[in-house]
Image (cartoon, grey):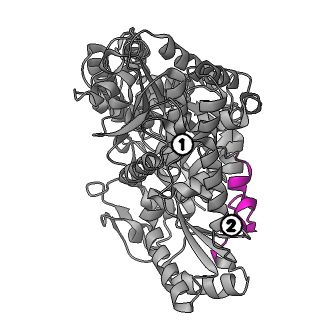
Amino acid sequence: MRILTHPDHLDAWRAKILEERPARKKTIVVTSGTCGQASGSLQVLEALRREIDRRGLADTVGIEVTGCHGFCEMEPSIVIYPQGTFYKKLLPKDVPAIIEETILNDKIISSLTYVDPASGHRFSRQKEIPFYQKQMRLLTENNFHIEPEKIEDYIALDGYKALGKALFDMTSQGVIDEIKTSGLRGRGGAGFATGRKWELCREAPGHPKYVICNADEGDPGAYMDRSLLEGNPHSVIEGMLIGAYAIGASEGFIYVRMEYPLAVKHVTRALDQARKHGLLGPSILGSEFHFDIQIVQGAGAFVSGEETSLMASIEGRRAFPRQRPPFPAQEGLWGKPTNINNVETWANVPVIVDKGAEWYAKIGTEKSKGTKIFSLVGKINNTGLVEVPMGITLREIIYDVGGGLKDKKTLKAVQTGGPSGGCIPAEKIDLPIDYDSLVQAGAIMGSGGMIIMDEDTCMVDIARYFLGFTQEESCGKCVPCRVGTRQMFDLLTRITQGKGEPQDIVRLEDLADTVKAASLCGLGQTAPNPVLTTLRYFRHEYEAHIVDKSCHARVCKDLVAYYIEPDKCIGCLLCKQSCPVAAISGERKKLHVVDQALCVKCGACYDVCPVKVRAVSRLTGTSRERIAP
């Protein structure tokens, strides 16, 4: 075991790691984060190991197991180096052909390569795929090259080099100045200047001081923090070490929800390795800096992501928020000065210290520097994690990186910032993604959730869904949030049931303003955002639900009924075969009939009918026609 007591020892270890690496002709990298394992990556991995052993190729072909590569839609996937060959959606039965054709004979298996949905072009190399080409992967690129349970892989890629630089070449104030010059803003929500936040904590009276990594990622569809912790945990640990040195903290905590077992496993392993090699604990790298980190697992309450709730949970109390000020930098954990940043913020720190603040500040926009990781989900072809420079437009993310919408549907809106964010309409598709532009549009950056919605999305129902989530996750401590969100949710439910009244829109706006202004913490203060933005940009949909009793997206089932028009039906049986509850009767080439008592209004018949089909409002008889492809 190497106990590192000087930065020179770190450099020597790095050189030895690189020197001792086996000289294999090819290496197969299996992406195996949570998304990969859920799709079957472990079975593919086992099949690869068996096939390589069977053929006696262990000396010439290596296998590495990494975290998520971001392209979750294509899991399980592999990349074969040095060519960078990318194969997607693999099954164990594909492995013998991969070894025979690609590993031994350098042939590409066309059926396993990626086809771009926008252009129809087929790509065999990972770097050429449009999903990756438009990205700028400062934090996530190393997920291709690091086995998260091997500290040696992180060291070989200049890991902990920035820590050595901070401890021996910079003062604590110098580190803070570097972070301030870089323009780094918190990636967890509000976007407060990170360097200034550190400085406030450093200047606050009281000892000991604490630093916390907030990994309580609770937004539906968001998994940026999970991916970083699973794939490159040492980058977060190194960032916390540098931040603790700058602030003067001696103890840190990583607060991670227990629904992330793989992240917890990899972080726990990484902390143990760092301690064994002298990178955590007393006299780090032989310096006078002492610091250690503990893991605290949260129970998964959304409100625990709020800073004061999170600290209460660490202290062993119920995760209730408290009034601010005092802010955590003044009185935080156990009443002592505390700095809290999220996973992505901490992971940026080693990059800034290593490459320099001026280099980092050239990336992004004037007020939003660096890159941002988004979880791209919803009605889009390329779901996954994308890391892009600040200032990139929604259009570039959706169509260049995301490959456009599924089934070539029309974009309706983009939800950013999770359940506390806002819905941006399609006409703002050229909006640059940075903190200020999103706020002006009524949304927020948040932690980085980005949900793509198409023409079949009901914006009233979406607002109801997100408000229902925040209402259920409210801790209930303050009346405006506890009662106000419930009243708003009830109003939205009435509207989606066809029971809304014109004055309900005014009531919603008044309630939203009250909840935002009077709630105790960020959950209540931002919960009305989905309602306010949908009212701002999609007011006509609310009016259609209330006045016409119609849901044009055919989502609100109380407002839709399906009928087969006698003069249109050709008796093809498609609707009957697609109905999941056998609500349609009829014989071939004869009129079919929908039993309204049995119909669950799923719309399957509507989707498969080859002629004009009608979705009719149950209450008013207004209709909407469509010719199916």
Q: Circle 1 — which element? A: loop
Write the residue at 68% across / 80% down.
109
| Position of residue 258 in the picture relative to residue 393 (left or right) | left
How far across and how far down the image is residue 169, in percent?
67, 29
Q: Is residue 185 magenta?
A: no
Along the viewing direction, whichever of 81 and 204 lies nearer the viewer? 204
Q: Judge by depth and name the residue closer to the eye, 287 or 379.
A: 287
Question: Which residue is tagged 2?
Answer: 115
Confirm whether the magenta stretch covers residue 113. Answer: yes
Which image quadrant is residue 299 in?
A: top left
Residue 197: give x, y in percent of width and height.
53, 18
Residue 565 visible somewhere in the drawing: no
Q: Residue at x 55, y 44 (%)?
A: 235
Residue 561 placed where, x, y %? 38, 49
Q: Is residue 150 visible?
A: yes
Residue 5: numbered disc: 1
Mark 2–mark 1 Cα distance, whole angstroms, equals 50 Å
Amino acid residing under circle 1: Thr
Label 2 secondary element? strand
Crowd rating for badge 2 (residues with CA inside 10 Å; few <14, some 14–19, many 20+) = some
Q: Which stretch is magenta?
A: 112-135
Front tag of 2 and 1: 1
Please give the name of the residue rendered at 47% of the width and 39% of the height, measured from the top-left corner: 458
Q: Amino acid at mark 2?
A: Val
Q: In the rendered structure, which disc, 2 or 1, sits on the residue that comes first in sequence?
A: 1
- Name the residue at 60% across, 34% down: 349
Q: 221 and 531: which one is in front?
A: 221
Q: Quadrant of residue 398?
A: top right
377 or 626: nearer the viewer: 377
